Image: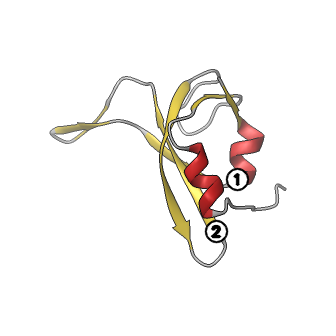
Amino acid sequence: EMKRSYFSKEQAEAQLGKRIRSLVEFSGVPVGTTGTVVAFDEIYPEGFDVVIEWDLADRLYGAQTKPLRDWFTRGEFEGFLVEC
């Protein structure tokens, strides 16, 4: 099992705007899907994770559409994604 590791605030901020690609399939995101780091969140007190907005057709939630976003710890980010 992967150890949960988190970004520092500075590391998370440095990821903003980076383009990434998925190396694995998960939660409806096919292998090879690209996306952008659009935000980060504090996971108190451990550190920060980052938010990826995927380049997928918008998903329909009721009457509004929203882009699909996923949250990644540092360990998940380094294990499942690659910068492109």
User: In the rendered view of the protein, which quadrant contains the N terminus?
Assistant: bottom right
Q: Earlier in the sequence, mark 1 or mark 2?
A: 2
Q: Is residue 81 above or below residue 56?
A: below
Q: Is residue 79 above or below residue 57?
A: below
Residue denoted by label 2: 47
x, y (%) of residue 70?
51, 45
Q: Residue at x 58, y 25 (%)?
A: 30
Q: Residue at x 42, y 24 (%)?
A: 56
Q: Secondary structure at mark 1?
A: helix
x, y (%) of residue 28?
52, 33
- From the viewer's side, name the closer residue of 31 and 75: 75
Residue denoted by label 1: 74
CB under 8 Å between discs 1 and 2: yes
Q: Amino acid at mark 2?
A: Gly
- From the viewer's side, name the closer residue of 25 and 84: 84
- From the viewer's side, name the closer residue of 61 and 78: 78
